[in-house]
Amino acid sequence: LSPPGSTPQPSTLAEVMETVRNMSNLSIAHEIVVNRDFCFKQNSPPPDSLEGRVKEIVHRAFWDSLEAQLALSPPDYTHAISLLQEVKEMLLSLLLPAHVHVRAQVEEALDLALIRQQAEHGALDLRHLSGFIINTMGSLCAPVRDPEIRKLRELEDTVPLLREILRVLDLMKVDMVNFTVQALRPRLLQQAVHYERTKFQEILEQRPDTLYNTTAWLERAVQEARSGSAPPVPCPEKSPGQAPDAQGGGLACSPDAVSPTAVLNQAFLRLLHWDSDCLLYPETLMMDRSRLEELKLALEQLTLTASVLLVTSTHCGGAVFSGPGFVGKLKQVITALLEGSHSRSFNLQEALLEVGGQVQKLVNEAACDQGGAAMTPERETILRGQIRDVAQTHNPVRNLIASRIQNFMLSFLGSTSAQKGPVGTPVGLAPVGAELAEAGAAFGRIVHHNRLVFGPYYSAILKRALLPQGETETDIDSR
């Protein structure tokens, strides 16, 4: 996205393709590093999509043609030989350097020159070759594919057998890629910061406007800090490996100076309240946008849940609220009834009215089980009304919970909080403490890695935004 009023610089097709390749490599490397569960999946278009329908038609035509060729007298092995060549290449691609003996067996058994001679003389035994292929696959596949191999051994017809062999080989190729990724992950973790920064710099050199949204994001955070419109953010200690000026740069956290650390922390916190429809997302965080969006939705749900629980605890008394399993039941009911609350079509007030009715019922049941009395109609009305009022954006209970959650998330932006694990849960948030700790740790990991990679860029932007007009940067190292 080019800055408004600027003239986009023309790019050649080669430059565009190079940028796309760099972005693709950067995204994959970043995903492998930050997502412990990352794995490649087989590309299977939806059957009802255009791509899915075209793929099905082409494949059906090929297999019908193969079946027709093999039904001739004598059989025509043109398509079959092409398939065997593809199978051979796929098998060889699955082999490791240590598989010397297996490689020699594959080369000998699937010698295409010999196979063509056998086909010309009508001596080609596809069933025998298929048996060798299945046995080789069985020796190479992951245990999770053993059921697939057993099914292959049960097939009798040649064409369905070859079709299934290719399908299972495709799955095995994906398994091998994922195995390789996991094996290389420790080394990738060591090189990740340097690699990601280098790739981003290449993109920046090709597209100098790449940091436009990032600059606007940080400059807005500076303006908010100077105007006092943003909540005050304390300054955690400097993180090892982070760019010095992006983490404080020697500027003290004082009322007379805006701390770069405070600005950067506030900017990161703003991402947890970002409008999903806004296109001006910081370029340096685009690869983590989906993860941050998920955190945002989870925190919004936790804010509502914790608000309802806090209102309930003030009405039902400690004995009922601390009863065995009571809070767990409340959380299940609240979570179920507020599912989808982030949707614009969701009627939060109506949902909270239903929540209030269910909470009232559970409170009365718990009180009676403990030998106490149910709430009076007046107290029931007050409880339901206060739960309903949580739907209001400026509801004091909701704002209090949201503020405490924000401060809790901020505590994970310190130097080592992401490694230490959850910090002390704020007052009133204990019932959702485990969920908050998990969200905070995830947020801390994202921010920590992002700062390591893009710290020098943040440092340069913040220096320009924070230094007084006319002051030079002669003695400041932006790297």
Image: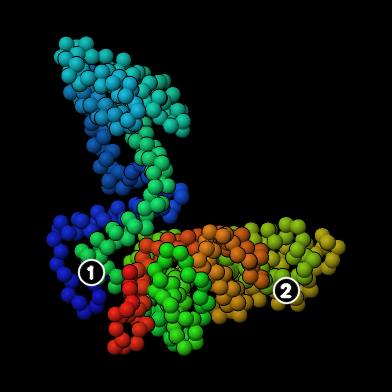
Amino acid at circle 1: Pro
**Residue 14 in the image: x percent, y percent?**
15, 56
Q: Residue at x 25, y 42 (%)?
A: 54
Give the residue pinned by disc 2.
314
Name which of mark 1 and mark 2 comes first in the sequence: 1
Classify residue 205 as left or right of residue 301.
left
| Snapshot colouring | rainbow
* Number of other residues with Cα within 10 Å of mark 1, as a class: few under 14, some 14 to 19, many 20 or more: few
**Is residue 341 something one can see in this rendering?**
no
- Quadrant location of residue 164? top left
**Residue 128 in the image: x percent, y percent?**
31, 15
Q: Residue at x 40, y 63 (%)?
A: 452
Give the residue pinned by disc 1.
208
**Residue 416 in the image: x percent, y percent?**
52, 63
**Number of numbered tags placed on the structure image:** 2
Classify residue 28 as left or right of residue 9.
right
Classify residue 304 as left or right of residue 272.
right
Amino acid at circle 2: Thr
Camera-near label (1 vs 2) is: 1
* Number of other residues with Cα within 10 Å of mark 2, as a class: few under 14, some 14 to 19, many 20 or more: few
Residue lying farthest to the right in this orientation: 371
**Is residue 326 something one can see in this rendering?**
yes
- Quadrant location of residue 34? bottom left
